[in-house]
Amino acid sequence: MKKSTFLAWIIRMPLIKRWALMHSVKKENIAEHSHQVAVIAHLLVLIRNQYFGGNLNPEKAATIALYHEVSETKLQDINHVTKYHNPELTKEFKKLEEIAEIECLKTLPIELQSAFEGLIVQSKVDPAYKTIVKAADLISAYLKACDEVKFGNREFDHVKIRLESMLDVFKTELKEVEYLLDVFFENCFVNVDQLSKQDI
C-alpha cells in the first residue's frame, strides 16, 4: 500500500505565516485563518438558510473553507496587492495555485481523490460555496485588520480600508454578510470582562 503525504502537508499549515510582508502585533498562520474562515462560512450559510431563503449545506461550506488555502502549504502566503496588482501576475499566480492544489489532491489514495477534488481544487468548487467562502475569507481578514489597527498598528490602516470597500460589495449581494457584520462584528473587539457581562 502506497503511503500518502496528504495529512503531513495539512498538519504543516501552522508553519505558514500570513501577512509575512507586514509587521503584525498578533501573528497569524494559515491553519488559524482557515479555521476562522470555516467558522464564518458555516455561520453565513446558517444565516442565509434561516433568514434569506437559502438551502446550502453549512457543513460543506465549512469543509471547503478548511481547505481553501491548501496551495499555500507549497507556495506560502502571497501578499494580496502583490498577487492582484497586475493581471498577468494574477493569472500566473492562479496557475501556480491550481498546480499546487492538484499536487495536494494527488497525494491522496486514488479512491479518495474524487471526494476531495471539489474541496481542494478551487476551480472545481461549486460557485455558490466558493462565493460564501470568499466572503468569509474577507471577513476574517477584515477582523484581523481591525484588530491590528485597534492595537495601534498603522501598517494595517490601508488594508482595513481596502477590505471595507470589498465587503461593501458583498453586503449588497449577500444579505447574510450584512447580517453577520451587524450582529456579530462589534463584540469581536471587546475585552473578556465585557463579553462575560453580556453573557450573564
Image (cartoon, rainbow, N blue to C red):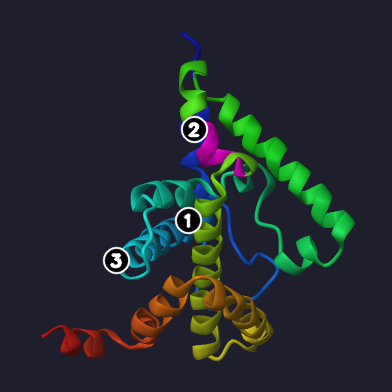
* Label 3 sits on residue: 50
Q: Earlier in the sequence, mark 3 or mark 2?
A: 3
The stretch of residues the image draws in magenta is 117-122
- Residue appearing at x 26%, y 84% in the figure: 192
* Label 1 sits on residue: 34
Between the residue at mark 3 and the residue at mark 2, the CA separation in whole angstroms equals: 28 Å
Q: Which mark is nearer the camera, 3 or 2?
A: 3
Q: Amino acid at mark 2?
A: Phe
- Residue appearing at x 19%, y 88% in the figure: 198
* Label 2 sits on residue: 116
51 inside magenta stretch: no
Q: Amino acid at mark 1?
A: Ser
Residue 54: percent from left, percent from top: 38, 60
Residue 3: percent from left, percent from top: 49, 17
* Mark carried by residue 152: none
Q: Which mark is nearer the camera, 1 or 3?
A: 3
Which element type, helix, strand or loop, lies under badge 2? helix
Relative to the observer, which residue lies in front, 113 or 128? 128
Q: Quadrant of the C terminus?
A: bottom left
